[in-house]
Structure formats: C-alpha cells, structure tokens
Image: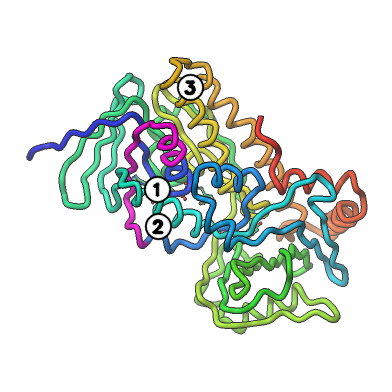
Amino acid sequence: MTERRLRTQVGIIGAGPAGLLLAQLLARQGIESVIVENRSREYVEARIRAGVLEHQTVQLLTDAGVGDRLHREGLRHDGVYLQWPGERHHIDFPGLCGRSVWVYGQTEVVKDLIAARVEAALPLHFDVADTALVDVESDRPQIRFTSADGEATVLECDLVAGCDGFHGISRPAIPEQLRTTWERVYPFAWLGILAQVAPSTDELIYAWHPDGFAMHSMRSPSVSRLYLQVDPTERIEDWSDDRIWSQLQHRMGLDGWTLNAGPVLDKGITPMRSFVSAPMRHGNLFLAGDAAHIVPPTGAKGLNLAAADVKVLAEAIVARTQEGRTDLLDAYSDTALRRVWRATHFSWWMTSMMHVNPHGDAFDRQLQLSQLRYVTSSTAAATGLAENYTGMPFE
Ligand code: APR
Ligand code: PHB
C-alpha cells in the first residue's frame, strides 16, 4: 500500500476546544497546522459539555476572531448564587474582583472554531483512524493516521500538540517513568440534563442539600442545564424525567421560588475526578487541555484551562518560529502547570464544599454549612471565590 506524506509546522491531535483554538491562534500568526480528529464533525459538534467562560477566555476567543456569536448570544453573568436549605445568597463578581463570566456552551465554542477553520479552508481531518505518534523526541516528529477515505498518512511536523483529551494517545506516548500523576476520584457523579425550558433563575445556582448537591445553569433564554449529585453507580435508565425534576425541585426548593420543568433534550451521568500529569512536554510533543489534566466540573474550569494552556503554547510556538527563541517553549510545562494547580485546588474546594460525601458524617456537613456561611458573608472569603471563578489573570 502507498503512504501519503504530508508536512506541516504543528501537528495537532484532537478537535476539541484545545486543538481547535490552538490551530486558530497559530493561523492568526501565519503558522501552519494540521488537525486530526478520530470522531466525525457531527459527533464533535453535538457533544454537550460545560458552559461557563472566564473573562479572559472570552477575551482570547474574541482576539482569535471567533467571538462574534459569543458576543451576540452569550449571556454575561455578574455572579452566582450559593444556596443551602432555606437560604440563597448572591456572590457579586464585579463588585468583588472587577470581572464577570459568560455563559456560552462549549459545544457552541467548538462549532464556531470549526466554522472558522472550514471557512479559511485550513486542514482539519475528521473520522481518522489508527492515530499514532512516532519519534516525538526527534526534531521531525510524525503523526501517522488512516484518513476518512482509508489512506495511510504520515504527517511530518516540527512539533506535535497532544490535544486529544483524557483518553487520547498523547499522554501515554510520554514514557511512564518520566511522568508523575496525581489523582482524586470523588465518591459521586453528576447527572446532567439539558431542557427546553426558560431558566428559573437569572444566574447560576449552586445548591448544597443533605440529599446531595444540585445546580441550575442555562444555555440560552429558552434552554436550561441542570445537575444533580448522584452515586457514580447510578444508571441513567433509572432516572425518569419526573424523578429528575422532583429531585431538582426538592434540593433547590426555596419559599417563593419555583423551578420550571420542561422537555428533556439530553441526559447523562458523568463521574468526577481530579487528575494532573506532569510534565506537559516530552521532546517535541506538548500536551494541552484534558490530555494532561481533568478537573471536576464544579468550578467550570475544564474548558478555561484548555484555553489557557493553548494560549501559552501558541505564544511559545510563535516565539520559536518567528524569533528563534526556545525559552517560552522550555517554560511551557511549568507555566501551564502553575495555573492548572490553582484551578485544581479551586475545583476540589468548590466540589468539597458543595457535595455531600457519602462516607462523611454530621461533622462534615456542619463544616460545609459553616464554610458556605463564611463565603457568603465575608468579603475576604467571597473575593477568593470570585477571583478564582472568573479566572485568575494570566501570568
Ligand atoms: N486521535 C484523534 N483524535 C482523538 C484521539 C485520537 N487517538 N483521541 C481523542 N481524540 C479527540 C476526541 O475525539 C476529542 O474530540 O480529541 C478531542 C479531545 O477533545 P476534548 O475531550 O474536548 O478535550 P480538550 O480539547 O482538552 O477540551 C477540554 O473538554 O472534556 C471537556 O471538561 C473538559 O471542558 C474541558 C474541555
Ligand atoms: C454548565 O452550564 O454546564 C456548567 C456550569 C457551571 C459549572 C458546571 C457546568 O460549574
């Protein structure tokens, strides 16, 4: 069989937010890249993920030329509500730290980035198979894959960006003895629904309840996104729409407030973990996004961390390509990991404060309630939440 040979500056594995945004940032600086993705465009554009963008993520997407629809359809939120039975409190982000967040689905970010790539007629291969990395330690690393039309392809690169998520091939391409990983698997999961109903709140509600955490988010003025803490062994088949709505009402209920129910468009259960793998570089392979780290969804940091990684990586690649400087690329892993650990701590902290630990006791629950009262009554404590939630400034 003949092999097709291609050449590019940056080979990118994965068309999630990390890979797509990296390609977009590089293209704006005249740097060539090729993206290979093993799923179809339809699949990638239909995947329902989180939906809160930090202030700086919005800035980055805007500067990258993909902010038009985000500014038209995204919802700026100036805070969140924290709640426990009988009390709901607002945290005012601009008042505390001068920044806001935007509610705009990750699915929409991905659609916008794919549209920009397709419009510019730049290479993006969906439905590839057999992706493999070769010679990543060398200065001519390769991505090998079988294209959608069945052609065996060798993509020769100056460097490779592993943006292939938690289950991809890039992290395992770093020899195990060179990697350190840290992991926390939480004893609960999120059952999430997307519903065709106007949100019952103007801003997100994070609710602590003795029967488990519940949360109200949204995607648009007519689509709501809601979550329930469930046991990780729960099966979605056992959760009828009625059962989900009644648990949401039970856990988020407050005198004088009603939760609007509506048709459920999508539902699923997601396990929760924290995971970090270091270093984020091996030779000419650079990891970004979920390929290197996972956070539980409570702080809405996953997409924002992926965006922060590729901002740092794109700037480092530009410095090497345009000025011959390698210092930024050499610092990439350490620079990215400092932000990763801040977000890892924040997500763990939000998760621990809001969820009922099935192995915990009444003492743990009193500590959580005390922490919630503190965060909602002390400006110092609320500021810590606000600046992390809206995103710490880039270094
Ligand atoms: N070859 C090609 N593509 C691959 C391979 C492979 N071997 N393995 C995985 N992929 C693709 C996946 O199909 C997916 O589209 O890589 C992409 C990785 O995208 P994401 O999982 O979305 O990861 P990332 O871009 O880092 O974005 C992180 O996504 O999971 C959420 O919460 C997370 O919001 C965060 C964001
Ligand atoms: C979401 O809208 O899907 C969402 C919002 C906030 C979170 C997690 C998920 O903390």
Discs 3/1, front: 3
Residue plotted at (85% across, 80% down): 255
Callouts 1 and 2 close, C-beta under 8 Å: yes
Q: Is residue 23 magenta?
A: yes
Q: Quadrant of the N terminus?
A: top left
Residue plotted at (39% across, 54% down): 115
Q: Position of residue 199 (x, y in %)?
A: 67, 74
Q: Which residue is mark 3?
A: 319
Which portion, as a residue range, is magenta? 22-42
Outermost residue toward the left?
1
Q: Residues within 10 Å of mark 1 (few under 14, many from 20)?
A: many
Q: Which one is earlier in the sequence, the residue at label 2 or at label 3?
A: 2
- Does 89 sit left or right of 238 as displayed? right
For the residues labelled 1 and 2, the Cα–Cα distance comes to 8 Å
Residue plotted at (39% across, 32% down): 30
Quarter occupied by residue 245: bottom right
Residue 125 shows in this picture: yes
Residue 189 shows in this picture: no
